[in-house]
Amino acid sequence: MDDKIKSVNENRSLLKAQGKLPSEPVWLQQTHSTEIVNATSQLIGSQAQADGSVSSQANIVCLVQTADCLPLLATNQKGDRVGAFHAGWRGLASGIIENGITAMASEPGQILVWLGPAIGPEYFEVGEEVYQAFDKKYPDCNKIFTEPINGKRHLDIVGAARLILGTCGVRHIYGGDYCTYSDKDRFFSYRRDKMCGRMASMIWMAD
């Protein structure tokens, strides 16, 4: 365990140095929740339990970690607020995006969202309970699921994010082009490798 903690700390130091970050990121203890925290300098080092953070302060690094789930980075057209959100299927079905857009405190039409690398629909097999979780909330969810075969479907997690963002009134949506599972050279994938390894997606406002 000590070696694992040491390795994590070393990787975080490398990230800060090589990424030329303006400060230590606001690391989150992610639990597939819909909790969003306001990232301030007081939260640095706290490991707040949440799956997203927003900030209106310069040089505060909002960060989420993923390894098949979808990272979303957001800002507004004024450039005075940023956010980072971790979206697995549980978070998406429960409202992580809706909470994140609300926390951005901006008109949805003025928000810009980038969708990072996530598992592609060809590889994301889910049970019928996942479909039911979406179907209760999003009437158009059929377009993001395949038809069931032996009680299993495939979910387009990027398509789900686009669908939900659209219902929130967000029009400026970018990214979503990379599959973690199929691109072994560049990305970790828990479903592919069955081992822990996560990527960090970050956003902040410079001075």
Image: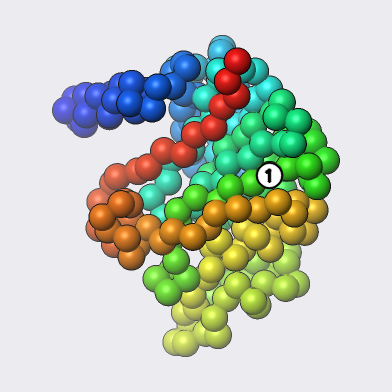
Question: Which quarter of the rendering shows the N terminus?
Answer: top left
Residue 207 appears in the rendering? yes
The answer to which of 118 and 155 lies nearer the viewer is 118
Colouring scheme applied when the structure was drawn: rainbow
Report x, y in % for residue 147: 55, 85
Q: Is residue 137 left or right of residue 89?
A: right
Residue at (35%, 43%) from the top-left corner? Answer: 198
Residue at (54%, 63%) from the top-left corner? Answer: 157
Total of numbered circles in the picture? 1
Which quarter of the picture shows residue 41? top right
Q: Secondary structure at mark 1?
A: strand
Amino acid type at mark 1: Leu
The answer to which of 84 and 38 lies nearer the viewer is 84
Residue at (37%, 58%) from the top-left corner? Answer: 180
Q: Is residue 138 above or below residue 70?
A: below
Q: For label 1, count other residues whose C-alpha is less than 10 Å away and answer few (under 14), some (14-19) or many (20+).
A: some
Question: Which quarter of the rendering shows the C terminus?
Answer: top right
Residue 52 appears in the rendering? no
Q: Residue furthest left?
A: 3
Residue at (57%, 37%) from the top-left corner? Answer: 84
Q: Is residue 39 left or right of residue 118?
A: right
Report x, y in % for residue 129: 55, 70
Residue linked to disc 1: 112
Report x, y in % for residue 17: 33, 21
The answer to which of 26 and 185 lies nearer the viewer is 185
Which quarter of the picture shows residue 197? top left
